[in-house]
Image (cartoon, rainbow, N blue to C red):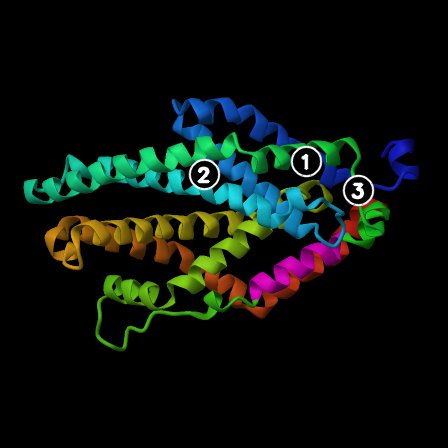
Amino acid sequence: MSQDRATVPTTIADYIYPAIQKQYVRILTLEADVLADDNLEAIHQMRVSLRRLRSQVQGFAPILDIPKVMSEKQIGKIARVLGKVRDLDVLQQTCKNHLSSLPESERIQLEKVTATITKRRRKDMLKVKLMLNDCDYQYFKLGINNWLNNPQYLPTAIVDIASILPELLLSSIAKLLIQPGWWLDLDLETGNDPETAVAHLLLIHGDTFHDLRKQIKGVRYLMELFPDRYPPQYTDSLNDFKQVHQIFGNIQDNVVLDKFIRKNVGKRAPMKLPTLYDRIARSNHLNWDNWQPIQQKYRGSNTKQELQSLLIRDIIHNLHG
């Protein structure tokens, strides 16, 4: 440890500022490609940066003093406009992946859905372009720029990081670990096969799992800022949360696909597209199987206590040991 590091405390502000600055720069860098609409990945990455920024503003709320124009609500509003286009891009790619291997009757149905997606995307992309040129978005960028030029914090941001980081992480993780989705299990006593049981559970409790994914995403984005403050076990938990984020992201993509097809094909969509719906059911079941070990792990009191102890104990050891 250098003399400067030993005498000058590391603070939460030392992490907050570069984190917000990084996402702001990425958003600005991606603007041109999003407006040109010749690189679908640009929309995805801009949306991710906005989501990371929103998670930072939310996670650091007890520490930040930010203007209303860069509030969590304002960031979410911008991200949702991009999100509608991104969801359609994912839908379009998913349909494309399935088309060539479907029976002809199903291919005809799915081609009609794909044509609707294309029309819808043109309209939603126009909304993105209008948004990126409107006053609210310009004020949003100006607000972040002004904050970066003159960052404002609450007093807790400038104390030694060991005095505040454990509580900051623990408060977010505690809310995550009591989320009801961890305790929802398949009901196989009804005689349904596992794929049908998963489909039924997701139908009944889809909102709960969607909320679980959103909470995990926020915790993941927050934890990703501090791997250098903790030993490898911290990264192990972070990787678990990343995996759950991906698992329920896959399931959510299937939910969005199902809703869009039913809206355009009708309630009889599963009968008109049986091969496709069999694939959706298998995909959800596979993702559910991947979720099971992590679900069981974090339902256990030992895992939760170990993670909580790690957050409190090891940062102090790393900083002062």
Disc 1 target residue? 144
Say what amino acid the circle numbered 2 marks: Leu
Q: Is residue 204 visible?
A: yes
**Left or right for 257, reference 68:** left
User: What secondary structure is found at the residue carrying circle 3?
Assistant: loop
Q: Position of residue 146 (x, y in %)?
A: 73, 33
Q: Residue at x 42, y 22 (%)?
A: 36
User: In this view of the protein, which residue sits in the foreground, 149 or 298?
Assistant: 149
Q: Which residues are magenta?
A: 165-177
Circle 3 sits on which residue? 152
- Crowd around label 3: few <14 · some 14–19 · many ≥20 (10 Å): some
Callout 2: few (<14), some (14-19), or many (20+) C-alpha neighbours within 10 Å? many
158 part of magenta stretch:
no
- Please report the residue visible at 62 percent of the width from the left and 28 percent of the height from the top: 25
Q: CA distance from mark 3 to mark 2?
A: 28 Å
* C-alpha distance separating marks 3 and 1: 11 Å
Task: State the residue position of label 2.
Answer: 82
Q: Earlier in the sequence, mark 1 or mark 2?
A: 2
- Characterize the magenta stretch by its predominant secondary structure: helix
Disc 1 crowd, CA 10 A, few/some/many (<14, 14-19, 20+): many
Classify mark 2: helix, strand or loop: helix
Q: Residue furthest bottom?
A: 189
Pick whichever of labels 3 and 2 is earlier in the sequence.
2
As shown in the figure, which amino acid type bears the numbered disc 1? Ile
